[in-house]
Amino acid sequence: MARLRVLISGGVGVAGPALAYWLSKLGHEITLVERFPTLRASGQQIDLRGHGIQSMKQMGLEDAWRAKSVAESGIQFVDSAGRRKGFFPVNQTGRGLQGFTTDWEIMRGDLCTLLYDQTRDSVKYRFGVAVEGMAQGVGKDKTVRVSFSDGSKDTFDLVVGADGQGSRMRSMILPPGTKPYRSLHMFLAYFTISQQPGTDYISTAYLAPNKRLLFTSRHSPDSIQAYMGYADDSEKLQCHA
């Protein structure tokens, strides 16, 4: 296989560095650009399932993952008075299907750092730079000419957009007027708040009337994640999404 020059745009998160790892293992020359000036090691708790676990192990990240994993023991559902109505523990047997909570829980920022450290020596990272424009070659020229926000230009055999939900790359590729999203009419706000020190690593969910959700999850001794969810097809909410 010919060695390809590949550009991954906006992807110093999870998908971008993971793809960069495997493409660099095949011998391709990878450049990854991120408009933010530094690594954005932030975000809330995520988990791996299925092929994600297999891929992570094949990347040699299992020990590093375990060292950073969130020791969540399960999820409880409560009523409006905080009384437990059901509890689903994590499946730690290594067999069967995973439940609501897995033993592969980690904070997104920690996973971003693991992937960056795993690829920083084999991938060219450019921070503080974004793709401003692209032009496909004509005829036998199959390359893509890319212009960047710092005024530089380069040519690649393949350009990959990994810049998330608000992707600028998607708007460059799709025809004008194309809607890049399909709304599920679900809205979620999440943030981290301080909490009294504790060792209770159990997630708590309250399913409120009118399609509302309150959810908390502890990931450190002195702070928790809080989520507020709402399902509605309101045009007013769509405008702020």
Image (cartoon, rainbow, N blue to C red):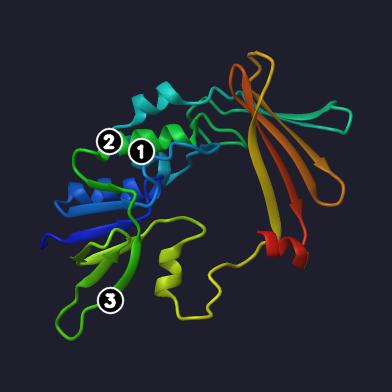
Q: Is residue 203 above or below residue 208?
A: above
- Where is residue 171 shown, x and y percent of the image? 46, 71
The residue depicted at 32 percent of the width and 54 percent of the height is 129
Which residue is depicted at the point 80% across and 47% down? 212
Query: Nearer the N terminus, badge 2 or badge 1?
Result: 1
Residue 45: x, y in percent? 55, 35
In the image, 125 versus 142, the foreground residue is: 125
Label 1 sits on residue:
56
Task: Return the residue at label 2.
Answer: 118
Return the x and y of residue 183 as percentages of the image width and height: 64, 65
- The label number, if any, that marks residue 135 in the structure image: 3
N-terminal of the two: label 3 or label 1?
Answer: 1
Give the spatial CA distance, label 3 vs label 1: 34 Å
Tell me which numbered mark, 2 or 3, is placed earlier along the sequence.
Answer: 2
Q: Which residue lies most toward the left here?
A: 2
Quadrant containing the C terminus in the rendered view: bottom right
User: Which of the two discs, 2 and 3, sits closer to the camera?
Assistant: 3
Q: In this view of the protein, can residue 21 be seen by the observer?
A: yes
Q: Is residue 9 left or right of residue 144?
A: right
Quadrant, the N terminus? bottom left
**Taking the image as drawn, is residue 233 in sight?**
no
- Residue sitting farthest toward the front: 151
Going by the numbered disc 3, the residue's amino acid type is Ala
Q: Amino acid at mark 2?
A: Gln
Look at label 1 and name its amino acid. Met
Image marks 3 and 1: residues in contact by CB distance under 8 Å:
no
